[in-house]
Amino acid sequence: MISAILLAAGESKRMGKLKQLMPLGGKSILEHSIDNFLASRVSEVIVVLGCEARVVVKKVAARPVKIAMNPAYREGMSGSIARGLDLVSDGGRAVMLALADQPFVDSRVIDWMIDEFNTHNKGIVVPVYKGRRGNPIIFAIKYRGELSRLRGDTGGRAIIDQYLDDILEIDTGSEAIFVDIDDMSSYHSEKRKFEKRQNKSW
């Protein structure tokens, strides 16, 4: 059992507007990210909201996900991780931390990471493309306490740096693991690429 924690509480300061709800095809960026995990073999999807949570929750409430609220979202990512961990079901083997602004990490990549975690005796699974690490990242449940104790705008990287011998890197063959949508320039660029792929599929 692996729980996905999708971090979607941020203010999108660089974007200038709430990027979680910006359109991409017929859905929002956040909806794409959620649906990729729902289509995968994760056991549950926990979405952590913060900025404009009342607006965002209306967009995703119909999906079979758990919603965690982080009212202290301005204090950084660590609080969102802790709120997500609060909703992880008992009996889980691991959590997968993911970013809401990476809508192109599809279920194939997610399932491959899960397979590798189940196959190897490593507690941390990190996706790689052309030697560069990205997201999402799987942490065995033994790291739950340390993840909960993170402070400030710190993600799981702080733990990765401490346990180098417990890391499994897998080459996903996909740049989607580090393509995030942070500003209007990256949004328009990725939107054009997405629409081009959609047109080809037709």
Image: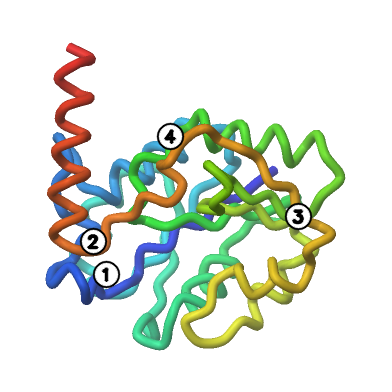
What amino acid type is highlighted by mark number 4?
Asp
Q: Toward which corner of the image does residue 6 lie, by quadrant?
A: bottom left
The disc placed on residue 106 is: 4
Q: Secondary structure at mark 4?
A: loop
Q: Residues within 10 Å of mark 4 (few under 14, many from 20)?
A: some
Nearest to N terminus: mark 3 or mark 4: 4
Residue 23 x %, y %:
14, 47
Residue at image position (75%, 67%) is: 143
Q: Which residue is mark 3?
A: 167
Seen in the picture, residue 102 relative to 198 is either above or below; the reply is below
Q: Secondary structure at mark 2?
A: helix
Whether residues under marks 2 and 1 lie with C-beta atoms below 8 angstroms apart, the answer is: yes
Whether residues under marks 3 and 4 lie with C-beta atoms below 8 angstroms apart, the answer is: no
Nearest to N terminus: mark 2 or mark 4: 2
Seen in the picture, residue 136 relative to 106 is either above or below; the reply is below
Q: CA distance from mark 4 to mark 1?
A: 25 Å
What amino acid type is highlighted by mark number 2?
Val
Residue 20 x %, y %:
24, 58
Q: Quadrant of the C terminus?
A: top left
